[in-house]
């Protein structure tokens, strides 16, 4: 378990009115947004929320009985662990704020991967696409329909970009994707590439369509791996870039917009973003790298790139990160965003 007996003790104490309420439980409500993080963290945060709500309800009915029932820390933690295990066993179907509810490719989803065009066609004419079955629940079907209309869509992603994205998983230790198409050996990387793209899109979709927030649990993550884009081994010949790494690096890139929509947590309490907690040199270098890709159109932007590079060379990593995040969001993002950055555009015009 990622959450400790002490964490659960605080939840129960708060629920019976005998202590302060952890930040996550003050800010999260069912329907208020999605919980992001590694699978076990999502399960535990949701279960903590459910436990808190149940104890509160029991307290309202019979204050003395609820306090007595959960007065033993071991008993309370055992109840928590029981329901976390239950959620894991049923594949999280009862977790109503689970981010990968939209992104999971299994069972009835019938993931289909295909390369458009003949295998002898020129490489830049080939694309990867994703389909889901008609049995998918309506909400998920609508999500994929919106996803298909954006630049995140697999069907609208050029072959070269797909190839580059898939090869990120391979570390050069196995045969890379060749110009003739995608072999069956690469199905895992195809799947991972699609999941990473869909999860990044879901950040914006949750904010713009359902007007929810992103509650990001950092528990269980190795933040150094995120900063350095570390790989996770799947077996002796395969590896992958974890989905959380892609999500957090996307949040870093677009923090100018997302900072009002994303909250980070550790042990149910508010946390600083990952780039404030560790590995600032790597995050600073990433900010410089990103600035060179997106700020290349005029003299002002060229000066900004030079300044960020200079600050990084002077090891002023905090300043690099802060100045990068001060760049208006609409200057940082490619076309076909799933939302409009009117506020940023208006601020930019007022400068």
Image (cartoon, rainbow, N blue to C red):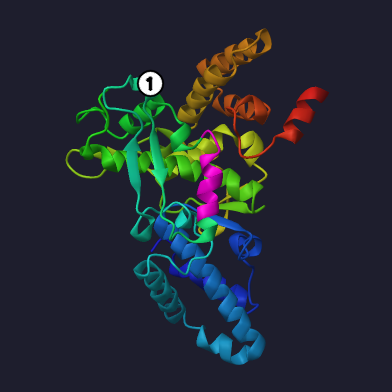
Place of residue 146 in the rendered image (x, y in percent of width and height, measured from the top left): 56, 45
Q: Does the magenta portion include 275?
A: no
Is residue 214 positioned above or below 280 on the image? below
Question: Does 149 lie within the magenta span?
Answer: yes
Residue at image location 33% in from the left, 42% down from the top: 113
* Picture residue at 54% right of the left edge, 50% below the top: 143
Say left or right for 212 vs 348. left
- Residue placed at 53% from the left, 17% from the top? 292
Instruction: Name the residue nearer the viewer: 276 or 142.
Output: 142
> Image quarter for residue 323?
top right
- Residue 168 rendering spot, x and y as whole percentages: 33, 31
Q: Where is residue 65 in the image (x, y as percent from the top left)?
A: 57, 91
Magenta residue span:
141-151
**Most foreground residue, 97 or 260:** 97
Q: In which quarter of the image is the C terminus?
A: top right
Compared to residue 26, the image places residue 100 above or below, namely above
Q: How many marks?
A: 1
Q: Is the magenta stretch mostly helix, strand or loop?
A: helix
- Identify the residue under disc 1: 124
Q: Quadrant of residue 14?
A: bottom right
């Amino acid at each position: 378990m990622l959450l400790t007996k002490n964490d659960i003790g605080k939840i129960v104490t708060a629920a019976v009115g005998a202590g302060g309420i952890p930040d996550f439980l003050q800010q999260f409500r069912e329907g208020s947004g999605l919980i992001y993080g590694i699978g076990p963290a999502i399960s535990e945060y949701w279960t903590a929320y459910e436990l808190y709500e149940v104890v509160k309800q029991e307290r309202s009915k019979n204050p003395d009985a609820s306090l007595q029932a959960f007065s033993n820390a071991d008993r309370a933690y055992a109840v928590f662990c029981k329901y976390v295990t239950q959620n894991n066993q049923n594949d999280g179907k009862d977790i109503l704020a689970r981010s990968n509810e939209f992104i999971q490719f299994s069972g009835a989803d019938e993931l289909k991967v295909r390369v458009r065009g003949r295998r002898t066609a020129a490489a830049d004419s080939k694309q990867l696409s994703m389909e889901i079955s008609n049995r998918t629940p309506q909400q998920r079907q609508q999500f994929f329909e919106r996803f298909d209309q954006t630049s995140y869509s697999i069907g609208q992603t050029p072959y070269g970009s797909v190839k580059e994205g898939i090869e990120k998983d391979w570390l050069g230790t196995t045969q890379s994707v060749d110009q003739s198409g995608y072999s069956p050996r690469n199905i895992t990387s195809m799947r991972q590439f699609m999941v990473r793209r869909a999860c990044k899109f879901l950040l914006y979709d949750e904010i713009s369509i359902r007007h929810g927030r992103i509650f990001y649990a950092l528990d269980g993550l190795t933040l150094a791996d995120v900063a350095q884009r570390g790989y996770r081994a799947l077996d002796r010949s395969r590896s992958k870039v974890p989905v959380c790494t892609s999500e957090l690096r996307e949040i870093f890139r677009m923090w100018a917009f997302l900072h009002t929509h994303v909250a980070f947590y550790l042990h149910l309490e508010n946390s600083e973003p990952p780039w404030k907690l560790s590995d600032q040199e790597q995050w600073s270098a990433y900010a410089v790298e990103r600035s060179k890709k997106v700020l290349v159109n005029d003299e002002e932007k060229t000066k900004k790139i030079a300044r960020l590079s200079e600050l990084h060379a002077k090891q002023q990593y905090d300043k690099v990160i802060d100045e990068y995040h001060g760049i208006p969001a609409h200057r940082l993002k490619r076309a076909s965003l799933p939302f409009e950055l009117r506020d940023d555009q208006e601020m930019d015009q007022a400068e």
